[in-house]
Amino acid sequence: MQQDYLDRLIDLSLDEDLGAAGDVTSLALVPADAEGSGELLAKEQLVLAGLEAFTRVFHKVDPRVEVEVLRRDGEEIKPKVVAARVHGRLRSLLAAERTALNLVQRAAGIATLAQQAMTSVRGSKLLVLDTRKTPPGMRGLAKEAVRLGGATNHRFGLFDGILIKDNHIAAVGGSVTEAVRRAKAHGPRLVKIEIEVTTLKQLAEAIEAGADVVMLDNMDDAQIREAVKLAGGRVPLEVSGGVTLDRLPRLAKMGVDFVSMGALTHSARAMDLSLEISGAKKAVRKPRAAASQG
């Protein structure tokens, strides 16, 4: 993950929490020289993600905080497994705690849901894609978590892929053919052109116009089966809208190539990880390569 992006995300997140005054509770209660230690503990089965962000939060607050990472991003762990340990000034640990947990819990939730989605289509050719429906400012973290869970990234933003949606079609007079024509004429030469359709008529028009990928938007199962027959393998098909974990196995049998699932990033719940901090005198060992789960 790009370090400048992660630093900006963490700076903004810490600023939201600490403001100009800092952690006034800890400043009032905890002596400046007090030290402490903590353990990042999984309280349910999950796929880890966001450990790099977790570590950098503590180092942003206080470069002297020691972080020992015990597990790897992308690793599935069980309840009661310790993923990381921290040691340093107690005020620093308490100031960083919530921000570090917010990032790792959210990222782990996305990775875990992505793994569940891919498990449900195992053995098929179907690829599960994410979308741009990510928490503002967290797209890089969310997209990485999707990959760690085994699913696949769609375009990262508006800048790296042409996806013609209903509002774009309306903007050119409602013509699928005209929308594809303009994309071919004015878009970057090496960028594929995908277009969203809602009817079989639009699908036929998109194929005839030379679209590289066609997105079937909010079609029911019967419509999707008809769309697959109509396309006849001439163009890759993506299903979007109403995609749930329960529906994925059915879609995998229909012959479509992709499903885009906004829920991966906009509805994944934060995983239950805790950071138990207590006063301590011993420092943890220096960071080392993550061990595999035994």
Image: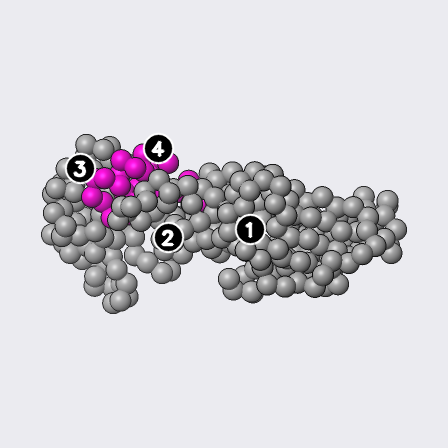
264 in magenta: yes
**N-terminal-most mark, 2 or 3:** 2
Q: Quadrant of residue 291?
A: bottom right
Task: Give the CA distance from mark 2 to mark 1.
Answer: 28 Å
Q: What residue sits 87% from the left and 56% below the top?
A: 33
**N-terminal-most mark, 2 or 1:** 2
Magenta-drawn segment:
239-265
Task: Give the CA distance from mark 4 to mark 1.
Answer: 32 Å
Say which amino acid is labelled 2.
Answer: Thr
Discs 2, 1 touching: Cβ within 8 Å: no
Disc assigned to residue 152: 2
Task: Give the CA distance from mark 4 to mark 3.
Answer: 18 Å
Q: Residue 257 location, x and y as percent?
A: 24, 48
Task: Give the CA distance from mark 4 to mark 2.
Answer: 19 Å
Relative horizontal placement of residue 292, taking residue 133 as reference (left or right): right
Disc assigned to residue 246: 4
Q: Residue 47 location, x and y as percent?
A: 50, 46
**N-terminal-most mark, 3 or 1:** 3
Relative horizontal placement of residue 230, taking residue 11 as reference (left or right): left
**Residue that mark 1 sits on:** 294
Secondary element type, mark 2: loop
| Nearer the observer, 88 or 63 | 88
Q: What residue sits 74% from the left and 58% below the top?
A: 284
Judging from the image, the colouring scheme is one colour
Say which amino acid is labelled 4.
Answer: Asp
**Residue that mark 3 sits on:** 225
Position of 15 relative to 249 (above/below): below
Say which amino acid is labelled 3.
Answer: Arg
Q: What residue sits 18% from the left and 57% below the top?
A: 181
Q: What residue sits 82% from the left and 48% below the top?
A: 279
